[in-house]
Amino acid sequence: MKSPVRKESCHDPRTVVQPDKGALIRRLNRIEGQVRGVNKMVSEDRYCVDILNQVAALQSALDAVAMLLLESHTHGCMQGAIKSGNGDEAIDELMAVVRKFAR
C-alpha cells in the first residue's frame, strides 16, 4: 500500500524541508552501502555480470528516490507555485528536471 504524500515546505526553494526526510535518508544510506559493495566487488575482481546486476539494482534504487522527491516536489512546491501564480516558471523547471530522467 502506498503511503500518502505529504506536502513539503517550500518557502525558500534553496532550502526545502522534506516531509519524509527519515525515509529518504534510510534509502540513501542503503544505496551508499550498495555502492560500497559494488566497489568491493570490483576490488575483488568479481564476475562482471554480478557487478552489472548490482549496478542495475543501484540505478533502480536511485530512480525510486528520485520519484519520491519528484512526487513530493509536485505536491508541495509545484502546487504552491501554481496557486501563487508562478505556475509557468515552476512547470518549466519541473520539465527540465524530468528531461534529465528521460534520457
Image (cartoon, helix red, strand yellow):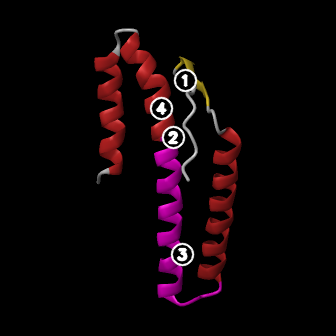
Q: Viewer-nearest of labels 4 and 1?
A: 4
Q: Viewer-nearest of labels 3 and 4?
A: 4
Residue depicted at x 70% and y 52%:
26
First of labels 1, 3 by sequence position: 1
Q: CA distance from mark 4 to mark 2?
A: 6 Å
First of labels 1, 2 by sequence position: 1
Mark on residue 54? Answer: 3
Magenta stretch, residue numbers:
44-69
Q: Quadrant of residue 54?
A: bottom right
Q: CA distance from mark 3 to mark 4?
A: 29 Å
Mark on residue 69? Answer: 2
Q: Quadrant of residue 46?
A: bottom right
Q: Main secondary structure of the magenta part?
A: helix
**54 or 81: nearer the eye?**
81
Mark on residue 73? Answer: 4
In this view, 93 is above or below 24: above
In this view, 27 is above or below 9: below
Residue depicted at x 62% and y 60%:
31
- Answer whether labels 4 and 2 touch (C-beta < 8 Å): yes
Residue 13 appears left or right of 102: right
The residue beneath circle 1 is 14
In this view, 45 is above or below 64: below
Q: CA distance from mark 3 to mark 2?
A: 23 Å
Report x, y in % for residue 53. 49, 79
**99 or 85: nearer the eye?**
85
Q: Amino acid at mark 2?
A: Leu
SS for dot 3? helix
Q: Amino acid at mark 4?
A: His
Report x, y in % for residue 15. 60, 24
First of labels 3, 4 by sequence position: 3
Q: Amino acid at mark 3?
A: Gln
In this view, 28 is above or below 60: above
